Image (spheres, rainbow, N blue to C red):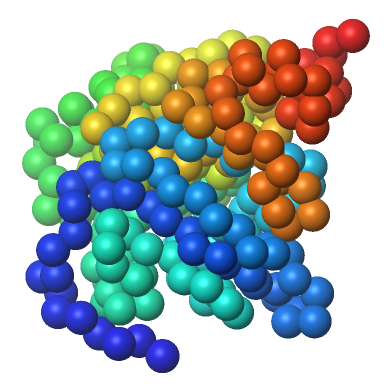
Amino acid sequence: PDRALPETTAIASPPSVVFEDVTFGYDPTHPVLRGVDFEVPGGTTLALVGTSGAGKSTCANLLLRFWDPDRGRVRLGDVDIRDLPLARLRRTVCLVPQEPYLFSGSLAANLRLAAPSASAAELADAADRALVTPFASRLPEGLDTPVAERGASLSGGQRQRVALAQALLRDAEVLVLDEAVAGLDARGELLLRRAMARARHGRTTIVIAHRLSTIRGADRILVFEGGRVVEEGRHAELVAKGGAYARLHAVTEGVG
């Protein structure tokens, strides 16, 4: 149950994200995470990699409190997230999912869902930083151009950049990017990687990725297997180590 600290409870800015001995299963008899420990220092980028079902996205689900751990705890700074009002948690942590959902309406209206009181200048700034402006400027009415339900009139990369702009407008201090480049072509991936690099600046960021080209610049990489962290380090040292990460790299990047 929530222990409801005051809405104004102080948290370091940007906060660290800490998993302490976290065990969790959607079915409690079959844990997905098994005693997971890691810390993302404030303002740094951590990448989570591993095969499907290894537990990466479950970490994001627990950080957003879609579920709570069966054992252990998740903290923002020194504060157990179960002690925070959910509204405060959701303002602090923003998820950019693999398949962002856009509503029928203008691009600007979809951006305003993240910050209803945002000014036109703030919308334009977020669109610039998330690289929405380059494609929006080619549309008949710019940011006022209507988009189809679910964003069907936009490409996958364009929808992802709109989702990043929403995260920037919300000004969340913790950003979770869950498989953000899955399914994009090479140009779409390049543009999204540039937008992600801008969005990460000054934020604590967790990147969940299958495509390892997207996380080479991460401050640290954790490799998950069977719900446990089996390796950690930076890209080059993990490739040189010749272990689980090197095997993933060989498969996903066509090496060898």
Q: Is residue 186 left or right of residue 142?
A: right
Question: If the image is split into quadrants, where does the N terminus sit?
Answer: bottom left
Q: Nearer the viewer, residue 97 or 254?
A: 254
Q: Is residue 217 above or below residue 9?
A: above
Q: Is residue 165 visible?
A: no
Question: If the image is split into quadrants, where does the C terminus sit?
Answer: top right
Q: Which residue is located at x 49 percent, y 19 percent? A: 217
Q: Which residue is located at x 52 percent, y 73 percent? A: 72
Q: Is residue 68 left or right of residue 229?
A: left
Residue 179 lies, in percent from the top left, at 61, 39
Q: Which residue is located at x 28 percent, y 67 percent? A: 79
Q: Is residue 47 above or below residue 70?
A: above
Quarter where residue 248 is shown: top right
Q: Nearer the viewer, residue 103 or 251?
A: 251
Quarter where residue 6 is shown: bottom left
Q: Is residue 141 left or right of residue 120?
A: right
Residue 181 lies, in percent from the top left, at 60, 30
Quarter where residue 254 is shown: top right
Q: Is residue 135 left or right of residue 13?
A: right
Q: Is residue 195 visible?
A: yes
Residue 128 lies, in percent from the top left, at 26, 22
Residue 85 lies, in percent from the top left, at 27, 77
Q: Nearer the viewer, residue 99 or 138?
A: 99
Q: Which residue is located at x 51 percent, y 31 percent? A: 220
Q: Residue furthest front?
A: 241
Q: Residue furthest bottom?
A: 1
Q: Is residue 248 above or below residue 26?
A: above
